[in-house]
Amino acid sequence: MLYSVIGYYSLILGLLSAIILIYFSIKNFQNSELLDTNILSFSFLQFFLVVISFLCLILSFVLSDFSNETVFNNSHTTKPLFYKISGTWGNHEGSLLLWLLVLTLFILLFLIKTKNQTIKYKILTLVFQQIIIIGFFIFLIKTSNPFNYLFPVPEEGLGLNPILQDPALAIHPPILYLGYVGSSIIFSSSLAATSLNMISSGWASHIKKWVLISWIFLTLGILLGSIWAYYELGWGGFWFWDPVENVSLMPWLALTTLLHCILVLEKKHILTSWVIILSIATFTLSMSGTFLVRSGILNSVHTFANDPERGLFILIFLFSLIFLSIFIFFFFHKTNNKDSSSLFWLSKETSIIANNWFMMYFLSVVLIGTIYPIFLDVLSSQKISVGPPFYHKLIIPFLIPFLLIMAIGPKLGWIKSKLLEKNHLILFLIISILISAIIVINFNSNFLLNTILVSCALYLFIVTLRESFNKKYKNISQNISHIGFSLLILSILLNNLSSSEIITNLKVGETFEANKTKIIFKSINQKEEKNYKSIKGTFIIENIDGIKNKMYPELRIYNQPNIVTSEADIKTTLMSDKFIVINLVKNQEYFNVRYQVKPFMLWIWLSVVLICFGGSMSFFKKKYEK
């Protein structure tokens, strides 16, 4: 109980420090020669108070203090220590406290690290960020208090959802939030720069670091969530267009587009409106994701709150921020017609703008597919779900020009260019088409579309790889990220082309044979663990070449809460994953067995890591590379 009291009053004092910070900011804005030392002091104090509050919640979980309602709802005495700690942010209240912690950390780092920028700009950024922070403080204290007291004190807690008790999901939310919350700094600084009419190449160079940090963490967060869903949920795939997957993808698409616009703005004073709008859109989409996940509107395995009051608060807060942004954009943003002169059709800027339009189209498709079922339900009470076919039909055809422009665009120069090395580009395209045709002809699939898609991805890979070796150290971060992206698209396409699946019901001792694969259900072993009962099957998988693999899928029956989960067994090699999962067939002795062969799964994960590595290389460029 003591930790709950300390944690709660730390939040109250943190809110008070935010109000004091706005007061000092207004006072300092009028005399803006030097940054008031009180501002830095109170920013550090605010961060320290939120850290204290967060540590108190962690201690409450570790000590199983069930007088705390959040601990009671999300923990249990038999839960391992690691999951007691990760359970701190594995719930609605704790995750919002983590949001607040990262918000206060980022603004403190911004004030400390930002140099060669005007004091007025720093102060205005602080004010806009504090408006967001105050909103989150009020939201936490009023509707989502992580320190609510229970009396009489229960002897035992309800436990954490077993599918959330996983190492990947323990680190997935903090990394994802670093990406989400990083967009708040971009949002605040964009509004500050717009208000002061200082959107320029210098500002673009300054804010690019924050865009990159946010983009890298958001990408890694999505990757970890995808890996977790792949092996923990037993879906057997890496992406299913689940609504909550989509709400993390949308800000990523906006942030990727913003990153490319910032690169153009660094070179030439154009796309200022794009930069401001995308800065606002990225944060708005991050907040919208928070609203959809926490309002109970979305029906997904990822959602963990169902409270209309919370949803209404976030919605009002979100609309307030949007209206503030629109007001500042229309009343303070000034375009310079001379600097924003028409672009030459064959230039690097034009290729980036063209791909930005494609990215905005992809974003629109994901947005419509995610929110259309919600509006249809509200207007007509009809419930529909938008699945993978919708996204595939609308997105895949547009990937073809998108990948071609990605391949050719970096070969162009800034402002005005001629397409150099035409012979090489044509030769590489022919080679890509021939290799793709040979690959696709082995599969019973849409020959024409798949050949074109694989050709474009392979073409991007070959052209970018040659560029990397041809011009050492030049655009190394861009080339690594583009190679990673081409590998990602290639791996996804080849994975879809050559995946196979067997679904059957088997008893212990039975054998099933199909698709040149024999599945032998050898035995079942039962074991008592600390907080669950394990039922582990032993399977022998034999293919046409006589190669045998032993695989051990598992069912876990948790004691608190009483839930059965499937734990897939995955044999990973460089070329493919062998994936098997079992489920109980109700009131029968049979087990439902699903066995899949998923080619190039490892390359999907590695390619995303490569994309992030390319982005991080921007921070380590030598002077001669710039």
Image (cartoon, rainbow, N blue to C red):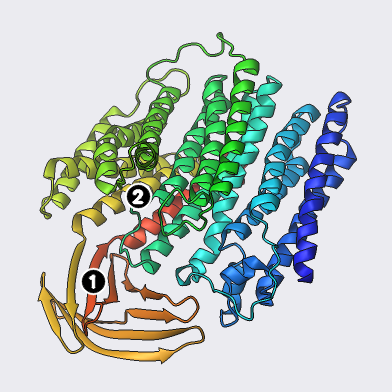
Question: Residue 556: x, y in percent?
Answer: 40, 80
What residue would you read off at disc 1?
Answer: 594
- Determine which of the numbered discs, if any, sits on residue 620 in the image: none
Q: What residue type is labelled 2?
A: Trp
What residue would you read off at disc 2?
Answer: 241
What residue is drawn where x is 41% and y is 46%? 246
Image position of 258 (left or right of 438)? right
Residue 116 appears in the picture as rendered: no
Vertical position of residue 26 compared to residue 587: above or below:
above
Question: Residue 547: x, y in percent?
Answer: 19, 80
Q: Residues at badges 1 and 2 in contact (C-beta under 8 Å)? A: no
Q: What residue type is labelled 1?
A: Arg
What residue is drawn where x is 62% and y is 18%? 333
Image position of 601 (left or right of 142)? left
**Mark 1 and mark 2: span between their CA atoms?**
21 Å
Q: In the structure shown, which secondary structural element does the residue marked by tag 1 occupy?
A: strand
Vertical position of residue 23 compared to residue 84: above or below:
above
- Crowding around mark 2 (Cα neighbors within 10 Å: few <14, some 14 to 19, many 20+) is some
Question: Residue 583: x, y in percent?
Answer: 29, 75
Q: Which residue lies furthest to the top in this view?
A: 338
Nearest the eye: 586 or 568: 586
- Crowding around mark 1 (Cα neighbors within 10 Å: few <14, some 14 to 19, many 20+) is some
Q: In the structure shown, which secondary structural element does the residue marked by tag 2 occupy?
A: loop
Residue 321 appears in the picture as rendered: yes
